[in-house]
Structures are given as C-alpha cells and as structure tokens.
Amino acid sequence: MLLQIKKTKTFNLVFINLLVIMLADSIGNGMSCVILPAILNNLGGKSAWIGTIMGIQSLLGIVIFLPQATFINKVGERLSVRIGIFINVMVYIFYLFNYKVFIATGKFIEGFADRLLNSSISKVVYDETDEKYNRGKMRAYVDGISAIGTVVSPAIAAALMSISIKIPIVLSIIILTISFIFSKNFPKDINKNIKNEENFDKSLGIKSILNKYYLDHLKKYFKNKYIVAITIPSILFSCLEVFYSIILNLYLLNNKGFTYSQVAILWSVISIINILLQVPSGFLADKKKYISFLLCILFNAIGFVIIISNINSIYVIIAAILLINTGCVFYTTAMSALFGDLTTKEFRLSESESYRMIRGIGEGLLTITLSFVFDKNAIVALIIIGFLIILGTVITLIINRRFEKSLEV
C-alpha cells in the first residue's frame, strides 16, 4: 500500500511538472512564430541564411540521435529536461541582440534543445504511465496544454511588439526561466529500476559502432520495400517545415500586406483548427486513408493557387492558408497511421529510426534550397512547395493502395 501511494504521488508530481514545462515551451514556440519574422525583416528580410541554419540542424539530426538517446539514458530525464529548457532560455537571450551571428546561433542551438526536451518528455510519458495510469489521457493533457500555449501566445507577442520587439522576447525569457526553476522539482531517476538496453558500449570500435548502431538498422530498413517507398513522399512533404517557419510569414508580411497582428491571429486560428481536426482526421485515418490523401491534394491545390495569385484580400488569403493547413493535417494523421501499418513488429525500431535519419537528410537539403529560392523569387518557391506537397501525397496514395491490395491477396 505504501509503495502504491508513493508511486501515485510520484506520478502526480511528474504530471504537474510536465504540464508546466510544456505550457512554457509552447508559449515560447508560439511567440517565436511572430518574433522570428520580425527579426528577419529587421535584418533585411532574407531567409537563406536562417534556412541554411535550419537545414544544417536537420542534417545533423542523422548523427546525433544515438548520442542524444545515450545522453538521456545516462544522466536521466530531469537533467535532460532542465538542459533543454536552459538552452531555450539562451535562444531568446541571443534573440535580444539584433545581429545575424546571434540570431543564427540561437536558431542553431534551438534545434538541439527541442530534440532533447521532446525526446525526454516523450520517454517520461511512455515510461511513467501504463493502462492503469491512463497513458492516452496523460498524452492528451500534455498535447492540450501545449495547444493552449500556441493559441494565445502569438496574439500576446503581436500586441507587445507594437510597443517594442524586445518585450515579448523578454517575456519568453521570464516564462522559460520560471519553468527552468520549477523543473528542479522534477523527480530524479524516475526510471532507475528499468533496465536500460540502449546504453552505449564503450568497448566497441568505430567500425563496430557503425555496424551495431547504424548499418544493422539500415539493412533491416531496406528489407521493407514499403517503408523505403514511403520515405520518398515523407521527404517531399518535409518542405512544410521551412514553409511554416520562415517562408509563409515573410511572404504574408512583405508580399500580401499582412501586419504582425494579423500573422499572429492566423497562427492562433491554425492552432485552434488543429485541435478541432484531431478527431475527424483520426477517424478518416482509421477508416478511409485514401479520402484523407485526396482531401490533401484538393485543398492544397486550391490553397496554393489562391496565395500565389493576385488576390490580396486578407480574408481570402487566410481562408486559403487554413485550407492548406487542413489538408496537411488530414495527410499527416493518415500518414502516421499508414506508417504504423507498414512497419514490421520485429524490426519496427530499426525501420523507424532509419526512416527518420534518411528523411532528415532530405529535409535539410530542401530547407536550404527553398530558402535560397525564396530570396530570389517568392512565387517560384511557393509553386515548388505546393508541387512537392501534392506530388508527395499522390505517391503516398499509390503506396497505400498497393499495400491494401497486398493485404487482400
């Protein structure tokens, strides 16, 4: 009984800490949607240099995923979470300085912080919960509190920026610092009794490390023709990262006459719609994946035609962007379900990790290329992004159909 009470108290403490940390992190991310475009405009409105930083981050992901997993297992979730929050505090401190080198440094280290924070929190959610402790409910609460942060923070940032761009940056620093202090209460070694089978074997040489941690995974990955095939549209669809984080905001501000407040409202509405679409997109992903993919093709075709046209009505453009976002939500939900169907139970870890590594290469190269194209011609960049999304969805639709036929046989 005492053991059960202690476990319940530990679970509640973990749960409360997770909610506080995720709320602070989501507020920072939401404000960044408005802050970063403003900073880029102050520095000349060019995206290539920041896109290059993001691209390099994606490319580095293929070599840091193993050290990161080893690091989390070695030092524990509490220290990993605190380091992730501390790095994010440093990101916004760098943003206070209106120089490219500081902004680039902040954006570069932000990638490491987000990976470390998200991986640590996901591991805690999985390890600390089971059917009795409502894993699904805890995940929903964590995602819900994150959604609240991303809904309200863009509008707050835009309102404060009317006074000074530094005010929302300072506010983000304060909120993240409070989260860092609060995370001191995060339970230490909460999974100390769980045997860790992923620890790095120091006795291995470089060749053995490559074989054990990389080549063996890749061999299993390439044996699954469906996972190899689905990697291609996934890479094409990864252009959404640079589209949402840089290109869309700068395009609306500099080409369509949007204000920072209007961009903030747009992102708040997008967050609300994403919440509302969770149930219907999940239903379609389980029942009729092909409908989700067809909706994505239709909505993106209409949406991109509108935003690259001469239409300058803010309401029409917002409707078009929301249409694009809706199509992409249906796609990503169905794609996630399809990916789970395509992976094999025996080699799921190898297939998924190899898939992420290869996708990271494509995402990095696309991010760098599209940011340079955008600086040369914004319309061409948007046409390429729209084409890649639609092409990726068509390929996914074909793969899904062939997989379903193979099951029928």
Image: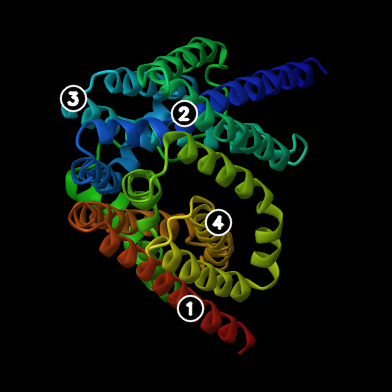
Classify residue 16 by image quadrant: top right
Label 1, on which residue?
Answer: 399
Q: Reading the chain from its start, which is encountered first: label 2 or label 3?
A: 3
* Rendering coords of residue 65 (x, y %): 34, 42
The amino acid on which the numbered mark 3 sits, given as a three-letter code, is Tyr
Label 3, on which residue?
Answer: 99
Q: How far separated are the C-alphas under marks 3 and 1?
A: 46 Å
**Tag 1's secondary structure?**
helix
Quadrant location of the N terminus? Answer: top right
Can see residue 191? no
**Tag 3's secondary structure?**
loop
Label 2, on which residue?
Answer: 158
Quadrant location of the C terminus? Answer: bottom right
- Whether tag 3 and tag 1 are in contact, CB under 8 A, the answer is no
- Whether tag 4 and tag 1 are in contact, CB under 8 A, the answer is no
Q: How far separated are the C-alphas under marks 2 and 3?
A: 21 Å
Q: Which mark lies nearer to you, 4 or 3?
A: 4
Q: Give the farthest residue toward the right.
A: 1
